[in-house]
Image (cartoon, rainbow, N blue to C red):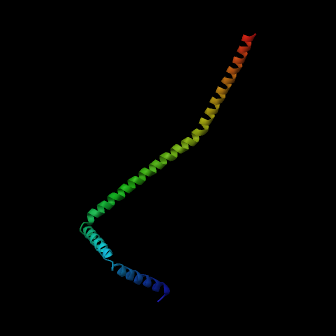
Amino acid sequence: MTRKNQFWKGMLIGAIAGGAISLLDKQTREAMKENVQKTSSKVAYIVRNPGEISEKVKGTAAKIKTTFEQVSEDISYITDKVEELKELTPQVTDILKETKDSFTENENTNLIEEVLGEEEKII
């Protein structure tokens, strides 16, 4: 035998021994008994009703597919909006600069007119 086979053989024997030792505890035995009963009843139900399980799996797969398509559409929409924003941002920046410059020019003009107007009042 190769060392690899011995390793896995040792792992299996160790797991079986560990499981057997853990069953010495009464609570562990009871919990295992309940789990085995639940699992065996579920397996029996699946064996008796394979069509129902198949329909549930198909329904779940359809829901997952629909959700994936919806998420893909949402991502595409968001990507488009980001691209639009990238294109609009320089335009908005230019408009804001022009507006600021316009207001700045108007304020300077008004200030000059106020100063000149006050000089006329003094004279």
Query: Looking at the image, which is closer to me, 22 or 85?
Result: 22
Residue under the point 51% across and 43% down: 81
- State the image coordinates of residue 34 (x, y, percent, origin top left): 28, 71
- State the image coordinates of residue 40 (x, y, percent, origin top left): 27, 72
Query: Looking at the image, which is closer to me, 91 or 40?
Result: 40
Quadrant where the image shows the C terminus: top right
In the displayed structure, 78 sits above or below 34; it is: above
In the displayed structure, 8 sits above or below 108; it is: below
- State the image coordinates of residue 10 (x, y, percent, origin top left): 44, 84
Left/right placement of residue 40 relative to residue 85 reads left
In the displayed structure, 44 sits above or below 81; it is: below
Query: Quadrant of the rendered structure where residue 85 is?
Result: top right
Left/right placement of residue 77 relative to residue 66 reads right
- State the image coordinates of residue 68 (x, y, percent, origin top left): 42, 54
Residue under the point 43% across and 82% down: 11
Q: Residue furthest left?
A: 48
Q: Residue furthest front?
A: 26
Q: Residue furthest bottom?
A: 1
Residue under the point 48% across and 49% down: 75
Query: Looking at the image, which is closer to me, 36 or 25?
Result: 25
In the displayed structure, 10 sits above or below 53; it is: below
Q: Residue furthest right?
A: 123
Left/right placement of residue 35 relative to residue 98 reads left
Count of numbered tags: 0
Query: Quadrant of the rendered structure where residue 108 is?
Result: top right
